Image: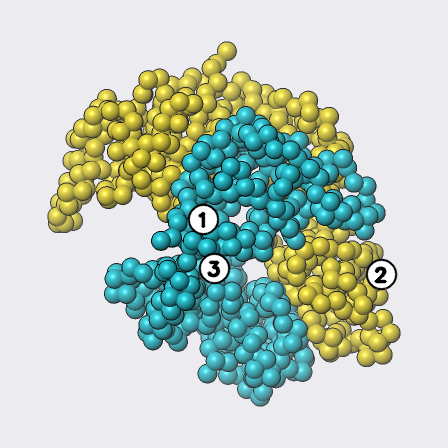
Chain colours: A yellow, B cyan
Amino acid sequence: MTKSYQSEIIAVGTELLLGQIANTNAEWMSEQLAAYGINVYNHTVVGDNLDRVEQAFRLAQSRSDIVIVTGGLGPTEDDMTREGFEQLTGLEMVEDKVTMDKIESYYQARNRTMTPNNRKQARVFEGARVLKNNAGMAPGMYVDFQGTHWFFLPGVPREMKQISVEELFPFLESLTGKQQVIQSTVLKFIGIGESNLEHELTDMIHEQTNPTIAPLAQDQGVVIRVTASASSKEEAQKLVADKKQEILARVGDYCFGEDEQTIENKVIELLIEKNKTIGVAESLTGGLFSSNLVSAAGASNVFAGSLVTYQTAAKTSLLDLSAEWISTYGVVSQECAEVMAKQTALKLNTPMAISFTGVAGPDEQEGKPVGQVYIAIWDEDKVVESSSILLSGNRNNIRERAALKGFELLYQYLNK
Amino acid sequence: MTKSYQSEIIAVGTELLLGQIANTNAEWMSEQLAAYGINVYNHTVVGDNLDRVEQAFRLAQSRSDIVIVTGGLGPTEDDMTREGFEQLTGLEMVEDKVTMDKIESYYQARNRTMTPNNRKQARVFEGARVLKNNAGMAPGMYVDFQGTHWFFLPGVPREMKQISVEELFPFLESLTGKQQVIQSTVLKFIGIGESNLEHELTDMIHEQTNPTIAPLAQDQGVVIRVTASASSKEEAQKLVADKKQEILARVGDYCFGEDEQTIENKVIELLIEKNKTIGVAESLTGGLFSSNLVSAAGASNVFAGSLVTYQTAAKTSLLDLSAEWISTYGVVSQECAEVMAKQTALKLNTPMAISFTGVAGPDEQEGKPVGQVYIAIWDEDKVVESSSILLSGNRNNIRERAALKGFELLYQYLNK
């Protein structure tokens, strides 16, 4: 029975609190630690302020087995990590000869004079294990303080990652012993809301232990992360695979892919599979659907082009809709979506076409409310899908949701 | 004497601790708060665990004037934010009728059955100020607990940002505005890099005190935030205005607007001013330029439509480029960009047109390297701009930079 370690990650740097950069170090480190079976319970960001750094360290010392600190090890005045830990622990700082030699030879090699504050980077805590930095100057270090394992790493992502892979993780594994292996997969859904998805799986979510099931709403739809831990990779993978089948047995109709799969990639895959090319007609979306499709590599195999008929006049000049036809059916109608799709397939000589028309707002149009959207799909010689939907949100939310709905309808049609 | 507020940001969500996503919400919020002159002293990430959420809230209550919580407000079982705050404060939860009506009508309008857990999203603390969510279901809320200002926001970035801009910041300003007199303006630049801009203003940036001058590279180009604090609003505004003039005297040629102004809005304004409509021809950008143009309200006054001629065949079918012409000049050439613009103006009956062709990658095309892009502008009866540029980055960076370059060229031409 291996002990379960509780860890946390502390980033030191005012630039994070100013919103100049995101704390991607914590994101990366958390993903790595999860793979080593170490639970991360907190991320903390604190600025370059001695007392607040010490306060963050004090809290971590009181609650965690493993603390990983990134940043604040540099040569400048505002690098406070060493000082904060010194103030908390009273540990002495010494100069690491290996690091100092490295710094000196660096400056000699470039005939540059070393400034005093460069020495600061060679200072480590007495008895600390130095974690070699092959990507930069300041080394990382490991300190065991009253049974809590402290790791200090530079804030520059490249250096932080390299030291972690080369020095930290191997040592951590020897320290904690072989932990449970963690495997996880992200199932991606479209056409079902987070709450409906959750409702379908309520009992599974209530009873979840291992694997865990975590639904999460994202801009492109809902995902479920299935995470299992076991003593072997194979065992963990089997747990994930079994739970995945259990989930898909209930809501598989809405699941379009896993992990890195996007709905754009999936639709392109299906079009290639069916050997179809597609044209697009866009009114309210104004090119957004086409642009999203093209954002996925491989689009050139299936996407011929688009007619963005934004102004009504363009529907006449590009799609040959007569003024009479328009005055009869209007440009915000199911009929218009259907004829847009048909004419686009004709103009582009593609078997398939999808069309979008509707009211993005701010004002209503032809008596149709803001958010009213019509989407049609043409295949070979007929309309195979014609939807009328009401979307909420502001002008651009509506455009984004209309484009996403288009991918949903296309996926459902091609996946039949 | 202005009171200085100490704020912190707490993100609730195990997905962050698993390294599934970075805490970009804290990054964005911090940058916004800095602009309001509010100091952010801590970021904290805590998982979907009732006791740890309460622990994080308890610490925040003990040290901060303003606490902003993102995430954990959704309908699902693992959303713990309400419960954690309830456990800390003992405040009662009530159902917000406006939100409940919205949820119910949402489901009615779509003939979908509401699941019980949807009601959860309508629960707010007694006496809380509800922050309307125009981008999604769960509203944000504001609670004053024992003098600490608590703001709760959904974790989905799109919803979090929209509620912040529409509801949180205006209220926050009214809350802190009495003591705080901070005025700032954001000057927006295009066609000049961050380092060149800084070089032009080096001395001003070194000598800055009040107002402060903060250059920041953003997706749409470079911005400079000028922030001044003073005892009266008028005084602060005057400080900002004077510094602004000083800056524009040096680099005004590159400044297209301020604050909420976008390059899309600016181009639309100039087109309206010159009473011109425009058509667009897109190849590598695949509709991105058009979509960006349409993202700005008012586009319908000037944007007729686009021909997205992605595959070469579409250049023939939509733009009448003969196979012979294409074999002579190629589809990745200055000549092609120019004829695309001309033909588009012709097809759409617009005085102006802009065109994009090039190589987004991953592979080179017609012997042209990845990143090679050609942009042409047509006005009345001739090509008035024809650019050949080499862009760096991955497939989508190149597409985005090409579209932005198009706005830059249009702005410079229309602004003459």
| Type of the residue with mark 2 | Lys
As displayed, is residue B369 above or below residue A226? below
Question: Please, which chain is the residue tagged with disc 3 on?
Answer: B
As displayed, is residue A209 above or below residue B73? above
Q: Is residue A171 left or right of residue B259?
A: left
Label 2, label 1: how far apart the Cα atoms are: 52 Å
Q: Nearer the viewer, residue B58 or B290?
A: B58
Describe the element under mark 3 as helix, strand or loop: loop
Share a chain, discs 2 and 1?
no
Q: Which residue is mark 1?
A: B30
Q: Is residue A334 left or right of residue A109?
A: right
| Type of the residue with mark 3 | Asp
Describe the element under mark 2 as helix, strand or loop: strand
Q: Nearer the viewer, residue B253 or B317?
A: B253
Using a 10 Å C-alpha cutoff, classify the residue at mark 1 as few (fewer than 14 neighbours), some (14 to 19) or many (20 or more): many
Q: Which numbered tag is attached to residue A382?
A: 2
